Amino acid sequence: MTTVVQIEDLSKHFVIRKEKSLKERVVNFGRSRKHREDFWALQGINLEIESGTTVGLIGPNGSGKSTLLKMVGGILQPDTGSVKIRGRLAALLELGAGFHPDLTGRENVYLNASILGLSKVQIDRYFDAIVDFSGIEAFIDTQVKFYSSGMYVRLAFAVAVHVDPDILLVDEVLAVGDEPFQRKCLERIRQFQSEGRTIVMVTHGLDQVAEFCDRAVVLEKGRIVTDDLPRVALRALRADFEEARQEERERAIASADPVSALPRAQFTGIAVASESGSTGTPVLADGEGLFIGMQIESERDLQDCVIEIGIANPLGVSVFATNTALLDIAVPPLGRVNKYNVFIPQQRLGEGDYSVQVGLTLSDGTELHRVPEAAQFSVDGDGRSRGFIHLEPQFAVLDS
Amino acid sequence: MTSTQADRAATLAEQPLRTAGPRLGFASGTLSSITDILGQRELLGMLVRRELKARYKDSSLGFLWTLMRPLAMLLIYYVALGKFLGAARDTPEFAIFIYAGLTAWGFYSEALAAGTGSVVANSGLVKKVYLPREVFPLSAIGSALFNFGVQLIILVLATAAVGSFPTGSRWGYFFMATAILVLFGTAMALLLSALNVYLRDIQYLVEIFVMIFFWVSPIVYPWAMFIDNVKSTVIQEIYLANPITLAVLGFQKTFWVGGDGRPFPDHLYTRMGIAILVGVLLLWLCQRVFARLQANFAQEL
């Protein structure tokens, strides 16, 4: 394997100045320290990316993902450390960067493609393919300012996927256009992967990371916190998000005035067991029932509670979810300690690992507590199928 | 792993790791900057065409507007200065004289004005794609050169129309003057476009300087009139140290055939030669300053 991106001890800080004009600078000259603020966007980043891999950069807003991508693209210069790359690089940080509204689609294709590094001869060769991919042949000689936003991104994306990079940097631009077009884009990404191109993508679409990436890097406050398989990284990130949400909720409880304050109630214990009696992280046979036991402690008596139960796959994608309102069960008012038991007879889940999600809300939708991964279990299969549910298909050969 | 993947990995393995973005060294970066810019020739051409196409898009007269401004200026100066104030009285072929100066000055002022704003105007691109950023001021120069070319054609046609077409060794002045204009225009555009990113006041300053320096070159009044009024040789020398003044004089020397026999500064060729050398040096310096400053463009915009 060849290293195509090598990042060593990379740091970047931004100075946030609060004034810009000459007058303000002169007036505030002596006090200029006060008017600037250092902000470390990235600190001590070490990362090596091998050729042919697809790496997802994920993390909360403001964690430095896009900054890191721009440093790899050479758009920003590092303060310390170095970024080294091999091969041709194309950055899709914004679709249609450099599109000029007054020029026609055709002129913009040529301009944009040459900005992305294609030569005139190459553009001539790909031009029909680009227009074909975008699906807006009819408007190609119209000025782009008359395009709908969908047409605009379609054309921009079509140009972008026809560049021939070894390394492709993608920032939040995959989810564009209508569904058929999106599928076309994602197919294109797959094709890029099979051609051994390296893709580094920043995205908030965690499902995309799970689907496309070989590796995911979680950034938080400018540092790498996890660098692992997408499954592991996503779990870490989701746990992070959950923590942040809890904190926010705690703050809301703490800061609100006592009258309207959210009542404090939370899950204090969740356990799963198989019908056959194994506990801990039970392995269920096909068709075996599942018990979920839970305990909720509440500070004060609570009316109108709704308890949610769900099952999710290891990537956090919900496979099944329900709640007491949907089940038409009236939860009796919560006391200090409350215990519940849920039985799911004859589960028909496909082979694999699952986790149980639980949530407690008020009937008006206010969330009191949520546990995204309350307990784990796995389901054993007979190896005759894949997917989230287990079915018994009957295959028949018809006479021709 | 399929064979295309392995092939690509193998090809990549042969390439050395290179630093992302521009190289920084002050002197050592010159060569790599030049090769980077040369590698973007096609893009440069497209950007120039974009500026030209976009400028008068949707106007029914289109490119004709490029000519309207200098022609209007010509008319104003011809009537106001030439006739009312009497400058034309002892200046033969006054219209040709003014238009020669205006053509030279028009290029320089457009290069400065458009060049200064070029990086800021393209901030969307600077922030999203890595390109040698020199292409933005250079494309401004390119489109100014195009307009300059159009005006030159008119100037040449005009000299033919009045029956005094410049011939022979006169064109030597023209080529040297154009070299001065392009060198200094490019150097200033590079420097000012980079500074303008950090301090937006630059573009307003430039507007004022362009206005002042218009009158500090013998564009609408002949050199003879200047030396009549300013006897001090020191001030005359300072006046002639302005390379744009030399370029304007060079243009007049070429196209203003009717002005033969009128006074011109001594050693004009030598002076222009020196200006060209200084221009080359200045261009190199400005490019290096630009290269230093461009590192932080994306975050300053």
Image (spheres, coloured by chain):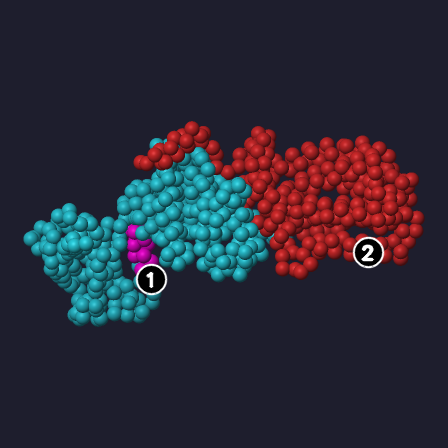
Chain colours: A cyan, B red
Can you give x and y, in whole percent of width and height, for residue A171 in the image?
42, 49
- Disc number placed over residue A35 in the picture, else none: none
- Work out which residue is located at the far right of the displayed protein and give it: B90
Residue drawn at point x = 49 percent, y = 52 percent: A96
Q: Quadrant of the N terminus of chain B?
A: top left
Foreground residue among A155 and B213: A155
Q: Main secondary structure of the magenta part?
A: helix
Q: Give the residues in magenta.
A: A236-249
Q: Is residue B234 above or below residue B107?
A: above
Q: Which residue is mark 1?
A: A252
Residue at mark 2: B75
Amino acid at circle 2:
Leu
Residue B17 placement (x, y as % from top left):
45, 31
Q: Residue at x 41, y 57 (%)?
A: A177
Asked whether the viewer can see residue A276, the reply is: yes
Q: In this rendering, which labeled residue sits more in front, label 1 or label 2?
A: 2
Mark 1 surroundings within 10 Å by alpha-carbon count, few (fewer than 14), some (14 through 19), many (20 or more): few
Determine the image quadrant of residue A255.
bottom left
The three-letter amino acid code for the residue at tag 1 is Ala
Lateral position of residue B126 relative to residue A212, left or right: right
Residue B242 seen in this snapshot: no
